[in-house]
Image (tube, rainbow, N blue to C red):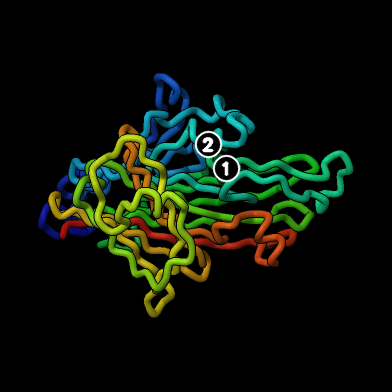
């Protein structure tokens, strides 16, 4: 591994320090104030300037994230709200907006995008003919069962920090889906690797929709920052794009009363099927890049929320298109996981210098 401009193997590091944490590591903490009180978190330090938190009690999503002292995980006014305070049906299905903060908010496991009332006859419970889903589903406010965390030596030269847990989204006469999430980050590296496996642990065919809301905030996001997106074509955009006319290539300063602008793009993948959208900040000399599998996430949304006090952008790879849940059922693109069936998603978050 390379640390502070020098190369170290396992033996060299052992001669210098009695614990890997001198170079980088994972520490378990509990947040203890305000709306965040009681949330278990894992603090990752790679030793190369990348620090980030895994929020165990928030579906093992990614919270605070910094590179060389500059934050890039969005920090909103909600903070990392404890899931015990969450009311799923609040605000007419928009309750996610009261707990929306951090680098990654996971959407799913059976519903994403805007709220919808959809058929639930597959669960064969007469009093429950339909189910009402809120914005981006339930999973982001479910605590995980932590399987473990620590460091792993793959060989004498490669040490990887890791954490793994399971999130269960289940109901009697309803879905029983399980998300197993593994987070890895090499010591001396500047990337976060996410491996998610979603399995139908129940006995009924169950709808599955999945989306990553990857949120970048200040100071990585700032006036003059620019998007580098390998766009083949844009298939949809919100009405606010024409009304406001704000560029989705170069980022302006925060704007008063800005209405979110959303685009659905088809991104061109590389020869391995991987798309790599970027946000570049030349003033800081840094970039953020997301690398995701387009065969698993065929849709991609670009989100601009450039309002004062809530200044953020997002990359959103998605299993389904913007029309959402009912449209996917109508056109046959809804994913139904059979009992025991699973899907795996591998994604990389990367930061670096220009």
Task: Locate residue 337, reporting x and y percent.
Answer: 69, 60
Q: Do we see residue 350 in this rendering?
A: no
Q: Choose the circle earlier in sequence order: 1 or 2.
A: 2
Q: Do we see residue 207 in this rendering?
A: yes
Of residues 251 and 4, which is closer to you in this image?
A: 251
Quadrant of the rendered image containing residue 267 = bottom left
Which circle marks residue 8 in the picture?
none
92 with respect to 271 (left or right) = right
Quadrant of the rendered image containing residue 100 = top left
Numbered disc 2: secondary structure: helix
Task: Locate residue 284, reporting x and y percent.
Answer: 14, 49
Up the image or down, 319 lies above or below 33; here it is: below
Numbered disc 1: secondary structure: loop
Q: Which residue is mark 2?
A: 96
Tell me, yes or no, whether the two marked residues, 1 and 2, touch with CB atoms within 8 Å: yes
Residue at the spot 35% in from the left edge and 59% down from the top edge = 290
Residue occupying the far bottom of the picture: 271
Quadrant of the rendered image containing residue 144 = top right
Which circle marks residue 135 in the picture?
1
């Amino acid at each position: 591994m390379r640390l502070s401009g020098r190369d170290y193997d396992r033996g060299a590091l052992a001669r210098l320090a009695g614990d890997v944490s001198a170079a980088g590591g994972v520490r378990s903490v509990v947040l203890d104030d305000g709306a965040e009180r009681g949330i278990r978190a894992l603090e990752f330090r790679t030793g190369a300037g990348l620090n980030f938190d895994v929020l165990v009690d928030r579906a093992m999503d990614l919270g605070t994230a910094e590179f060389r002292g500059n934050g890039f995980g969005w920090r909103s006014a909600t903070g990392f709200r404890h899931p015990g305070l969450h009311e799923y049906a609040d605000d007419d299905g928009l309750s996610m907006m009261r707990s929306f903060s951090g680098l990654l908010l996971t959407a799913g496991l059976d519903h994403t995008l805007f709220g919808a009332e959809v058929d639930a006859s597959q669960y064969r419970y007469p009093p429950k003919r339909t189910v009402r889903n809120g914005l981006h589903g339930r999973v982001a406010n479910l605590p995980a069962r932590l399987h473990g965390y620590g460091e792993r030596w793959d060989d004498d030269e490669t040490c990887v920090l890791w954490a793994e847990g399971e999130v269960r989204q289940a109901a009697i006469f309803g879905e029983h889906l399980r998300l197993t999430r593994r987070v890895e980050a090499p010591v001396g590296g500047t990337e976060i690797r996410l491996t998610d496996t979603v399995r139908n642990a129940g006995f009924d065919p169950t709808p599955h929709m999945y989306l990553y809301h990857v949120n970048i905030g200040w100071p990585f996001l700032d006036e003059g920052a620019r998007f580098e997106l390998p766009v083949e074509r844009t298939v949809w955009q919100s009405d606010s794009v024409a009304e406001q006319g704000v560029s989705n290539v170069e980022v302006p300063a925060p704007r008063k009363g800005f209405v979110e602008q959303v685009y659905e793009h088809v991104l061109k993948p590389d020869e391995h099927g991987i798309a790599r959208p970027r946000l570049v900040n030349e003033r800081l000399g840094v970039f953020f890049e997301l690398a995701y599998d387009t065969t698993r996430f065929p849709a991609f949304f670009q989100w601009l929320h450039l309002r004062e006090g809530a200044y953020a952008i997002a990359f959103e790879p998605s299993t389904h298109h913007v029309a959402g849940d009912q449209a996917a059922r109508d056109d046959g693109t809804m994913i139904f996981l059979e009992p025991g069936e699973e899907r795996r998603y591998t994604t990389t978050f990367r930061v670096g210098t220009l």
